[in-house]
Image (cartoon, grey):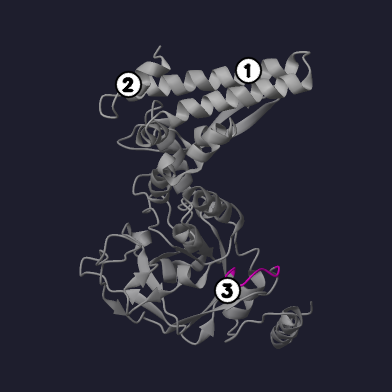
Amino acid sequence: KVCCSQIKSLTPRRLKIQHLSSFLLLMTFEMRGKRFLQSSSEIPATRASKRVQNSSEKDSAVLSGLPTDVIYNVTSFLDVKSLLNMRVLNRSFRVIASHNSAGWDSLCETFWKTKVHVRPEARNCTDRMASYRLAVEDARTRDHLLPEELIYDIETKTGTIWSFRFKESAGEDWTESDPWFNGLPCRKMVFLANGRVKMIVQDEDGEPSIELPRFNQMEPTLADPPLDMSWRFLSRPLDMPTRPEGSYIRFSVGGRDVPTYCVHRSPTKNWGFVMESCWGVYASFELPKKPTCPRRRILRRAQDATGNWFNVEFNVEAEDGELGSEDDDDAEEAILNRSRLLIDDDSFAVTSGLQWKEAFLYNFGARSLPEGDDAVAQFERTYGAVLNRMNIVP
């Protein structure tokens, strides 16, 4: 136990962080206990309010006697939940826990280092506690791309580089030439503001000329893809609900529209974006490599709380003929499981069954795919014409 007079007599350098932390914790529990007793006791309201006021004044006096940099040094060790709990104790603590130096600066920077996209308004906000809240809320509620999150600027060498790979449903003609299906890193693509699509030039051995999918200080070599490509936003593709701009991307490859790419947040919880169609996947970060070791499916029996038995399937990576260790760290296992969501095509939401109409039109030679309110009517006309040409009665 460290008394208040001892803390005041210590200089910031000699003050031990654990002592002051313990003191603040004890004072916190003391204030909570006082509030509980005062609210539950049967004393007059005016008398209780005076005691609460006197207690707050004493607490404020104690805090005002401590060096500011010492208090902020202690609060910088707190996590987000602790700082928010500290704000509800009294006015003095609320002011302290809301300040940028209380730890919000380091919390934002440390947290954002692990995230791919942080809303610019959150980064530019001077109030770091508000920045943290704005960034988390934006990542939780927004599933569409902003132009600055999609486009790469050639002049400033800033922007997002997208990883791309095909799905198995695209067919062997496309997957055989896909680096990802050959155990190499994904192709790297960039989208320009003029609607053009460029590709990152790769080295002779097939490795990308850069290591990171997002770069601000590197100058990669850009080239045209094998087939001329362009992109544009659309808000209502065929058989899809209307969503804000940036939710759907329509690519034209070789002068022909391909099935629409739907935008959503990455299941890996890194605040990145994934664009997927029934035939391909784009990601605003490095996609995990295709596993080279065989995978095994283990079928086990399990019993629920009511006594009913059911089958449970486990995907296990097999290395050197063994099934792997069960004492892997929980955090690493969670990251690995989330990465598998970008490896297994069965984990993606957009399938050929969902986009069969656009895939049908493309396979039968359509150069442009319908969109908007008249999309269904256009498809019915084209579908009927194809059936008539093939002498098929619907």
Question: Disc 3 versus disc 1: distance between alpha carbons?
Answer: 65 Å
* Dot 2 crowding, Cα within 10 Å, few <14, some 14–19, many 20+: few
Res 380 label: none
Q: Quadrant of residue 151?
A: bottom left
Question: Disc 3 versus disc 2: distance between alpha carbons?
Answer: 71 Å
Give x and y (percent) for residue 334. 46, 38
Residue 315 higher or lower than 370, as above or below: above
Give x and y (percent) for residue 270. 46, 51
Amino acid found under the numbered disc labelled 3: Pro
The answer to whether residue 307 is visible is no
Give the residue number, with chain letter if any, for mark 2. Answer: 9
Relative to 387, 121 lies left or right: left
Give the residue number, with chain letter if any, for mark 1. Answer: 34
Amino acid found under the numbered disc labelled 2: Ser
Q: Quadrant of residue 163?
A: bottom left
Residues drawn in magenta: 241-247
Give the residue number, with chain letter if any, for mark 3. Answer: 259
Residue 115 higher or lower than 47, as above or below: below
Which quarter of the rendered picture does the C terminus lie within?
bottom right
